[in-house]
Amino acid sequence: MRSVNAVLASLAAAALFVPLASPAHATQSISCTDMKEDSSVHIVLGAGPVPNVLSVSIEMGDWELTTDPNLPGDLVVKAQDFDDGEVFRIDLMDQQVTKRVAAIRLLRADHDTMPLQLGFIQIEDDPPVGISCTGP
């Protein structure tokens, strides 16, 4: 009986050191381009009842901005994102959070096959550029 208890105690102790599986984090994305398709915006969203912006990457003209330090481009910080069901707003700031670097505004329209967003991106004081996006 003592050996059975020892084995059970050893198994219980070993179970404490087995890492538990972490929950999977589902992501979705929104991909945008301008009319000439030489600029792009890529937005990664986390799962949830409201949009949860995980990262934003922008390539537009000489600008290359990202909130992900593992991607190429100038690092920016997400100041805010807000979706009221009709307009999706994202503001990106410099790393010191002293000035807005980019503003993304998307007007949402649902369709049976794929949602569509139309809007613009404005970087600093440059004129806004119209974009169309696909994704959730």
Image: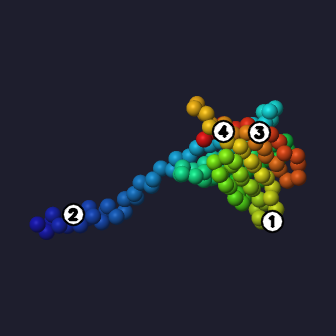
Q: Quadrant of residue 99?
A: bottom right
Point out the tag, 3 or 2, that comes first from the N-terminus.
Answer: 2
Q: Nearer the viewer, mark 4 or mark 1?
A: 4
| Amino acid type of the residue that numbered disc 1 sits on in the rendered structure | Thr
- Report how far apart the C-alphas of labels 4 and 1 lie in the structure: 33 Å
> Mark 1, residues whose alpha carbon is within 10 Å: few (<14), some, or many (≥20)?
few
Residue at point 76% right, 62% down?
95
In front of the other: 19 or 88? 88
Q: Where is the N terminus found, in terms of image quarters?
A: bottom left
Q: Which mark is residue 131?
A: 3
**Which residue is identified by label 4?**
109
| Amino acid type of the residue that numbered disc 2 sits on in the rendered structure | Leu
> Mark 4, residues whose alpha carbon is within 10 Å: few (<14), some, or many (≥20)?
few
- Report how far apart the C-alphas of labels 3 and 2 lie in the structure: 62 Å
> Mark 3, residues whose alpha carbon is within 10 Å: few (<14), some, or many (≥20)?
many
| Residue 107 in the image, given as x and y percentages of width and height | 71, 43
